[in-house]
Amino acid sequence: MSKIEIQLPDNFELFTDSIIERGWIGEAGENQHYIMGAVSKIEARTLAAVILEHNCQKSFETGVANGISTLAITQAIALTNGHHYGIDPYQFTYHKGTALNLLAEHDLLDYFTLCEGSTHLEAPKVLNKHDEFDFAFIDGMHTFDYKFIDFFYADKLLKAGGLLVFHDSLLPSVKKIFRFIKILKKIKNIGYLPLQSYNQIYLQKQNTCLQHSSKVSLIGMNGIIIFVIC
């Protein structure tokens, strides 16, 4: 595997940098929400850089939550004149619409569509539209059953050459799915990032079944795995 360098365009300011550094979203006071369980600064930068490098124009994610990853992805997608979809059953009931407020604050709402519901209910609706996606980020429910459903629909929705990203690479549910994908031989490893960036692994979808490296290091509690699916 080769190391992947994080390269954002010159003079490109990723909005998530300052938000993650301050540690909260919303308005100061009663409406202030501290950031917990979100992607890190380096992970957000990597998501944006990969989208721009591969000129991804249509993306989706599971688990919008407080909107840090959503903001990074949508900002990058906006530069390619694309559109980002987010599947989340709790955006208004638990997260109080913080992700949408964050996007509105940065004038990015026009590039985002919220699919309010669980993946097994919302993804089939998207699939029925016969849309193909360039990029998918899975960071929803962490149990195996929900992770597998996320992967199943990501595999159906991504076009050949599309990128599939898993957050939390050391979760037992993610590791189990990763073993399953290797058995399928439907992915190709195209690189990884060093430990200080939480070890994000990149793989890519192609038209035919691919050979896959039999040894892949999974390092970092909040690591991102990025697949490219057949």
Image: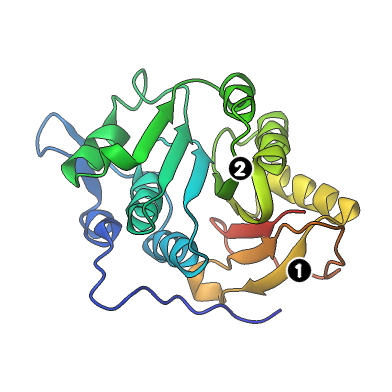
Residue in front for this viewpoint, 209 or 199: 209
Please identify, in this view, whether the residue under mark 1 or under mark 2 is nearer the observer.
2
Q: Is residue 38 left or right of residue 150?
A: left
Quadrant into which the C terminus falls? bottom right
Instruction: Say whether residue 219 is visible.
Output: no
Q: Circle 1 is placed at which residue position?
A: 216
Q: Indicate the secondary structure of the residue bearing disc 2.
A: loop
Q: Indicate the secondary structure of the residue bearing disc 1.
A: loop
Query: Which corner quadrant of the image does residue 100 belong to?
Result: top left
What residue appears at the point 43 percent right and 67 percent down from the top-left corner? 49
State the image coordinates of residue 109 (x, y, percent, origin top left): 27, 38
Q: Circle 2 is placed at which residue position?
A: 132
Q: Is residue 205 left or right of residue 37?
A: right
- Is disc 1 surrounded by few (<14), some (14 to 19) or many (20+) residues within 10 Å? few
Residue 40's place in the image compared with 61, above or below, is below
Which label number is shown at residue 23? none
What residue appears at the point 21 percent right and 38 percent down from the top-left corner? 104
Q: Determine the CA span between mark 1 and mark 2.
A: 28 Å
State the image coordinates of residue 50 (x, y, percent, origin top left): 49, 65
Residue 172's place in the image compared with 125, above or below, is below
What residue appears at the point 50 percent right and 57 percent down from the top-left corner? 56
Instruction: Say whether residue 41 is visible.
Output: yes
The type of residue carrying mark 2 is Glu
State the image coordinates of residue 135 (x, y, percent, origin top left): 55, 51
